[in-house]
Image (tube, grey):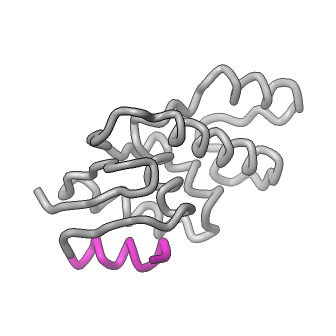
Amino acid sequence: MTITELAAAMAAKETPITITEPALLDLVFGLSTHFNQNSLRSMASGALTGMFVSGPSAASASMPYMQSKQVEDIEKQLQKTKRFPIGLTLTENHLPIGTHFTQDIDQVRAILAAAPEYLITLVSAHQIVLDRK
């Protein structure tokens, strides 16, 4: 499944939707409130490299180093999670994270817009399931 396919499935109100693709897992987890976007490690690495970006400017920035560090942080937090299942709530505050996975930010916005109609569950570090409420 791709980001475009996920956005289309959510817009069509399909259920259940199972995500097992690593990049899509990282994206959905990164968009959730469970992901600590402002971890000390993220802020320190950004400050040390002189590339610290926050807020709306992050969505328009093109910084491959920050992108790889952000994705790395998402993967590490996801792999450190030990208790399952976990309910995830997606937040528009994490919209800039979507730029690390696609240049079509409208697809990420579509996922965020459809998310309130779904119960999103992190079943394991390798699977997320979306069921309609």
What residue is at 34 percent from the left and 48 percent from the top? 122
Please state the extent of the stretch shown in magenta in the rendering: 1-13
Q: Is residue 77 magenta?
A: no
Q: Is residue 86 left or right of residue 101?
A: left
Residue 104 coordinates in the image, percent (x, y): 57, 71
Residue 97 coordinates in the image, percent (x, y): 57, 49
Q: Nearer the viewer, residue 84 or 40?
A: 84
Please tell me whether residue 64 is drawn above or below residue 48 in the rendered image.
Answer: below
Q: Main structural element of the magenta stretch: helix, strand or loop?
A: helix
> Residue 28 occupies which quadrant of the picture?
bottom left
Q: How many marks?
A: 0
Q: Is residue 58 left or right of residue 91?
A: right
Q: Residue furthest right?
A: 49
Q: Is residue 102 left or right of residue 32?
A: right
Q: In which quadrant is the C terminus drawn?
A: bottom left
What residue is at 73 percent from the left and 50 percent from the top? 67
